[in-house]
Amino acid sequence: MVWPEVGIYVGEGASHSWTWFADIFDRKGICSVRFFDEAAIADGALDAIDVLFISGGDTFAIAEGLGSTGAAKLEAFITAGGVYIGSCAGAYLPLKSSLFPLNQFNFVFSRITNLTKNLPAPKQMAEKFCTEYGCRYVFHPVREEVRVKIAGGFSCVGQELSVPLYGGPAMTASDDIEVLAYYTGFTDKTAFLVDREVAEQTLIGNVAIARKRLGQGVLYLLGPHFEHPHYPEANSIIFEAMLDGYAGPRLQHDSAESACEEPGIVNRNLMRAFKGEISNGRIVALALERKSLQWLIGKKVYDPEKIRVFLEAVWSRISVIDRVECMAEEEGYYLLHTAQSVTTMLKTLKNESDAGPAVTVAAEELFAELKALAAAFLTLYFRFKELRDPGGTEFRSIKTPKLHTPQLHNSLPEEAT
């Protein structure tokens, strides 16, 4: 199977859930995966891919980071034949809005149903319940599992699927979209943040997946996290959307072999030191999870559990990179330096939390460094994977680790808009 060239947004505003895309691509044997921040997109990185994924996080921060340049690049990418797949915050981003900076991305006219001037009373998790939106509020009626019915566009049409919802939108039908799925109900894993009646009015019967054709390309907007690696049945939606209209690369892309013509000799001591830093970071992160901590970064609430999502994305694959054949020495030093920086920041955050409430600025710097570390490592990992097995059929897949900690509020890692 020849898969499209994939880009995953990891820049300003992106939360930990972009690693879920990496997990399911890894398991599927999709090797041509790149990771872009807003600067790379401004520099033309979208010219090298066929499909762009933007997952959960802070929609306002994503829009601000991309800015007018990123909006123009994104529109040009789609109209030229690219596929945009937005999940949660990535689904909010292209929807019609009058607020700056979101109004730079008015690609889809559908509106959201979880927008109100008069907030209902939250029953739990008030800190994750809503986000200010001008003189209104975007509120999240439930978290965890919901049921959706596939109405068209996919091979499982007519079926109902369970899929997690962590702050993503319910959308109205509009003349410019195709309704591919709608919310139908809840499960025994659903966590109600408002009265059930309000949740039903907000979600049930409204759009969970919308598709819009734009020029030669297409946008898929997914309210729930169909990319969550613990939901393989839902993951099939992602893979089918990737192939929408795909008949081979639009452009001649660089191969893994050409990127590794002069790989250099990697110092094994350097890689052992890198593994040690990741191990140390995991220990400190686990200690932070035992504390009752939260940080408001932008418009998004972060919990200590999310720290280890990034670290586990590295740790679960580190034995593969230990025998890497495609890494320049400067890449190894960058990974080590960034891992050392993460460990130092984690220790600082723990010391501050021992003395009192942890400083949000320290947490903000830490999550930025965690994203940089995970993106750099996964770039190397997928490059190595493509070099070893371009077909993606024989390379050992990585099993997504489950994080078991006593501090988790719900049964799954959390995501908020």
Image (spheres, rainbow, N blue to C red):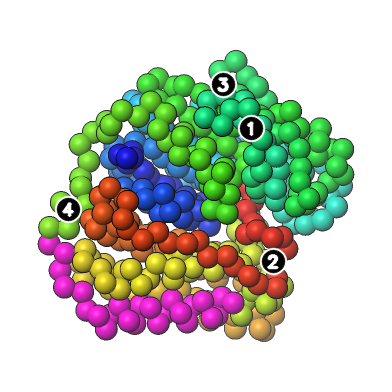
- The residue wearing badge 4 is 257
**For the residue marked with disc 1, what is the amino acid?**
Gln
| Distance from Cα at disc 4 to Cα at disc 1 | 42 Å
Most foreground residue, 205 or 76: 205
Residue span colored magenta: 262-286
Q: Position of residue 412 (x, y in %)?
A: 65, 58
| Left or right: 218, with 254 as reference point | right
| Mark nearer the viewer, 1 or 3 | 1
Residue in front for this viewpoint, 133 or 392 = 392
Q: Residue at x 71, y 60 (%)?
A: 410
Residue at 72%, 54% in the rendered image: 128
193 relative to 217, above or below: below
Answer with the quarter of the image where residue 292 lies: bottom right
For badge 3, the amino acid type reads Ile
* Cβ–Cβ under 8 Å for marks 4 and 3: no
Image: 99 above or below 336: above
Quick one: SS at disc 4? helix
Q: Can you identify the residue that label 2 sits on?
A: 408
In the rendered structure, does residue 341 fall within the stretch colored magenta? no
In the rendered image, residue 296, in percent from the top left (x then y), is placed at 65, 60
Foreground pick, 138 / 242: 242
Q: Mark 4: which amino acid? A: Glu
Residue that badge 1 annotates: 159
- In terms of secondary structure, what is the magenta stretch mainly? helix
Q: Is residue 276 part of the magenta span, yes or no?
A: yes
Looking at marks 4 and 3 on the same chain, the residue that comes earlier in the sequence is marked by: 3
Mark 4–mark 3 Cα distance, whole angstroms, equals: 40 Å
Residue 191 appears anywhere in the view = yes
